[in-house]
Image (spheres, grey):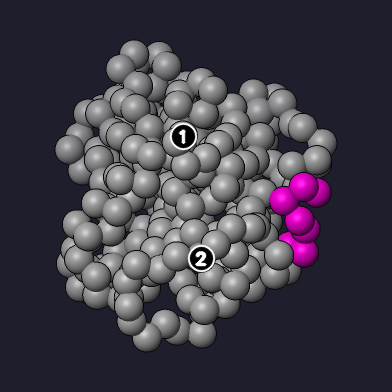
Amino acid sequence: MFGFGKKSPKNAGSKSEAAQHLIELLDCPYEYFPSGTNEGVIMSAYNEAFARREMDGCTPMIIVADDMLLEDFEDCGKSPDKLLGSAKIDARKWFTEKLSYWKSNISGEFWNETVGEITHEPGNISKSFVGFLDFGSPRKSKECLLAKIPVTNPWEVFAWLPFGGWNECPPPEEIIWIAKYWYEKYGAIPAVMTHDILEFAARPVKDETAALDLALEQFAFCSDIVFQGVETIGRLAGGLMQSSVWYFWWD
């Protein structure tokens, strides 16, 4: 349904029905990791695939085998070509409209408190992926795949993996173009996906003004990372100045 290519598992193990179904849907080269796999093993495989992505003509994604994620993929019912052929959106205009919505629905004083000042706090710095980890077993993974999605343009993974379109999460038709904008502006590359988490590999944004602009964009994209996370956009901006991973989570 979503792809092509020869499947080539490197790791043995008893796969769940969700993992088997995900493999069938992706139909592309992958490595399988059972739950409880050490974080370092998966990251070593990811880093190797990431280094070879241009040579191999693919974008590696760590995808957690999750029934809810599979349901979202199936409910989308759109092929990669159809998603990529959707009307292109202007990401900057999209961010402006979302921020205008929040400003109009939040009182001026509370909006100012939500933005806050740029602060640099260690707890807001992200330098490693966490979405595939089992938080009940530190540094061990949930059941997941390292899928080598056959696209050289990283944002196109969202045509193969139609994430979003529920609650406050944007639909895949919008995420594709937002990811394209972030890749071209910041070099951000999608890397991890669960049913409610996205993580991107990115470079720290050193300039404070640029970091605040990016934090506002990320808030527009996923307000939960502020309201249920770092609490202010300024704190998010401070973290982005030292982070090499962008983390998004929707309730």
According to the image, label 1 marks what residue? 54
Q: How many marks?
A: 2
The quadrant in which residue 107 appears is top right
Magenta segment includes 211: no
Q: Regarding mark 1 in the picture, which secondary structure is present there? A: helix
Q: Residue at 34% of width from left, 67% of height from top?
A: 10
Badge 2: few (under 14), some or many (20 or more) residues near its Cα, within 10 Å?
A: some
Badge 1: few (under 14), some or many (20 or more) residues near its Cα, within 10 Å?
A: few
- Left or right of residue 127: residue 62: right
- Left or right of residue 128: residue 183: right
Q: Report the Cα–Cα distance between label 2 and label 1.
A: 19 Å
- Left or right of residue 113: residue 166: right
Q: Amino acid at mark 1?
A: Glu
Q: Position of residue 42 (x, y in %)?
A: 28, 59
According to the image, label 2 marks what residue? 7
Q: Residue at 80% of width from left, 40% of height from top?
A: 85
Magenta-highlighted residues: 76-82
